[in-house]
Every structure is written in C-alpha cells, then in structure tokens.
C-alpha cells in the first residue's frame, strides 16, 4: 500500500525558515540594540528602567529591571496608559523635567524594540509614541505649579566659574595630592574633558615630548588629540616626573596624602566639589569645568565649528548650550 508523500514546496520552506528567523530576531532584539550603544548609555538606561520598575511595583506589577532589559516578553501588557501614568508619577515625585524627558525617551526606545519583537501590538505602540515629555517653557510652567523636589542626577543650572576662580582651582599645594589636583583641574578647565574621559586617561595619554594629550571620547566614539595648554603642560610635567604614576594617569588619594591606584568618576566628582568648596563654589562638579571651558573659548574668539571639533560634539547646537550668556546681552555685538 502506497503511503502519502508530503511534498514541501519552496514557498512553504521559505515560510518556515522565515518564521524561525523572526523568532530568533525577536529573542535578540534587545541584545542587538544594546551592543551598538556605549556602556554609559546602557548604564543610564538601566537606571531609567529601575525607576520604571519601581513605578510598576507601586501599581501592583512586579517585574525586575533585568527582565525589562533582556526579555521582551516582560513588557507584555505595557500600555499607553501605563506610560502616560509614569510621566505623571514622576511629576508628582518631583523629578526634574530634564530627567523626566530622558526616562520617557528610554521607555519609548524599549517599547519600539518590544513592538519590533512582536510582543507589543502596533496599535498600542502607536499610542505610546504619542506620550509627550515637556519643552523647556512647558516644564517651567509645570514647575511653577508644583512643589519641586528636583530629583535627578543633573543640576538645574551649571555653577558659573570666573577666570579668577579657575586660576585658584588650578593652583594647588606642591604635595602629591596637590600636584594631581592641579593636573585634574587643568584637564577640566583648559581642555573641557568629561569626567569619564578624565578617568580613562593613562600615563601614555600624555606625550610630554610633543606636548599633546590623546584621549577617547566614548560618548561620541572619537579619539582626539589636544595640544596641551602651557598650564596643563607644566602641571603634567611636574606631576609625572615627581609622583611617577603608572597605568591610570590620575592616582587616587589615600590617608596621609599618599597616592595609589586610580581615581573613579565618583572620586573625581567628589574631589572637584571639595576643591570648589575651598574657594566658595557650592556644589561645583567636574562637568561645570566643561561649561567654563566652552564659555572661555567663545569669549576668547573661538568660532563655533572649532569649539565643536575640540569639544567632541556632533552638532554645533551642543556647544552653544554650554556657553554662559553675557550679563550684558549685547556685549560683543559689533555694529558697522
């Protein structure tokens, strides 16, 4: 007796292979996305999703941040209403408008990935995309109607640093810690390095023979070379010849003023705050040095394109956000 023979047509085979491929792609949609992002971005997104998980827990939904970052299925059931509620919850909790907008952007990014994985219905994702953050003007209006606690990592405004204060910050005692601090402040104030970029410097980053600084800007994935300013060169020369760091350029402080190991981003930020407090600057941070550098560069005659290149920004709009406005609005305006 002849048995029926099942023939798989090329069309059926392609459909089966396509389904397998779709399943694989949906399972790896988070991994593929995260592999393309810088470590700092993933670290920030994790913090954003931790807050989202805390909000969901208060709503009676228990989900871990690990699942939210690795498993698209954990997003099953996320709706426009929950995302909109997250925004309102952050407002009530007193989170800064800037922090709120960033966290909403993270939720939308992952919702897009979840929709791509087929877990979130396209209609629901379309609604989630419509959840809006707040413009600067709208945020200001909202802040006037709420008791602002201002939760978030960033300050509302950078701490302004005068040229005299910058000079004082770069003038530290002739001790191991002081010599390191002098170089630290020169890197922040004379070169506009980000805190993470300073942490990543090694002894080989500075070429004293050529007077250059070579470093990696992780945020924009660029390797840059800066010509050392005279003050930075003198600080680097004295520190490297006297204190002889190995490995990481800036050594950490220990009791008794000894230096060893390396400085973390947290340690750099804390040290800048201490040095600023010593001259009357309250809550000054390492990033305030970047604002000072950009402002000093523009007031010294640097064009925006050159500042953009030196600062490692991807667009000319970014350095303009760092430049402090003149107290006299039309100062610098030249009429023909």
Image: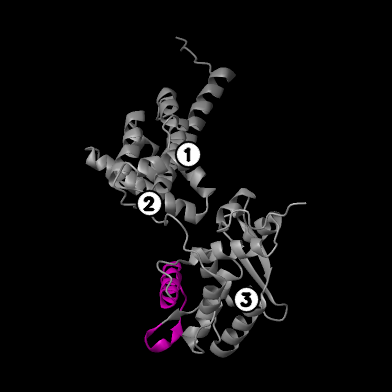
Q: How many marks overall?
A: 3
- Read off the magenta span: 254-279
Residue 135 at x, y percent in the picture? 46, 40
Residue found at the very far front of the displayed protein: 336
- Which residue is depicted at the point 51% across and 32% down? 21
Q: Which mark is residue 47?
A: 2
Q: Could you say which is closer to the camera, residue 85 or residue 172?
A: 172
Callout 3: few (<14), some (14-19), or many (20+) C-alpha neighbours within 10 Å? some
Residue 15 at x, y percent in the picture? 53, 22
Q: Earlier in the sequence, mark 3 or mark 2?
A: 2
Q: Earlier in the sequence, mark 3 or mark 1?
A: 1
Q: CA distance from mark 2 to mark 1?
A: 20 Å
Q: Could you say which is closer to the camera, residue 326 or residue 234?
A: 326
Q: Give the SS element for disc 1.
A: helix
Q: Is residue 56 above or below residue 15?
A: below
Q: Which residue is mark 3?
A: 204
Q: Which residue is mark 1?
A: 29
Say if mark 3 contacts mark 1, CB within 8 Å. no
Q: Give the SS element for disc 2.
A: helix
Q: Give the SS element for disc 3.
A: helix
Kindly tell me whether residue 142 is visible in this rendering.
Answer: yes
């Amino acid at each position: 007796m002849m048995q029926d023979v099942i023939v798989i047509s090329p069309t059926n085979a392609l459909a089966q292979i396509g389904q397998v491929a779709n399943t694989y792609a949906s399972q790896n949609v988070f991994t593929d996305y995260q592999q393309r992002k810088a470590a700092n971005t993933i670290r920030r997104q994790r913090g954003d999703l931790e807050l989202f998980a805390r909000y969901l827990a208060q709503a009676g939904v228990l989900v871990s941040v690990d699942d939210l970052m690795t498993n698209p299925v954990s997003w099953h059931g996320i709706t426009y209403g929950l995302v909109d509620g997250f925004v309102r919850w952050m407002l009530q909790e007193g989170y800064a408008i800037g922090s709120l907008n960033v966290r909403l952007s993270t939720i939308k990014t992952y919702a897009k990935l979840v929709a791509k994985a087929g877990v979130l219905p396209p209609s629901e994702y379309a609604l989630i995309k419509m959840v809006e953050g707040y413009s600067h003007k709208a945020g200001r209006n909202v802040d006037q109607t709420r008791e602002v606690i201002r939760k978030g990592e960033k300050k509302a405004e950078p701490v302004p640093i005068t040229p005299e204060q910058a000079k004082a910050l770069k003038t530290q005692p002739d001790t191991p810690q002081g010599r390191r601090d002098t170089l630290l402040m020169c890197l922040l104030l004379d070169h506009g390095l980000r805190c993470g970029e300073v942490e990543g410097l090694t002894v080989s980053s500075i070429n004293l023979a050529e007077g250059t600084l070579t470093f990696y800007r992780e945020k924009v994935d660029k390797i840059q070379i800066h010509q050392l300013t005279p003050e930075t060169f003198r600080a680097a020369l004295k520190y490297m010849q006297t204190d002889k760091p190995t490995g990481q350029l800036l050594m950490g402080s220990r009791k008794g003023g000894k230096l060893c190991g390396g400085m973390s981003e947290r340690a750099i930020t804390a040290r800048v705050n201490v040095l600023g407090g010593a001259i009357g600057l309250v809550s000054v941070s390492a990033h305030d040095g970047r604002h000072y550098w950009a402002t000093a560069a523009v007031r010294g005659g640097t064009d925006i394109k050159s500042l953009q290149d030196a600062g490692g920004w991807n667009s000319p709009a970014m350095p303009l956000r760092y430049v402090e406005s003149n107290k006299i609005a039309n100062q610098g305006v030249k009429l023909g």
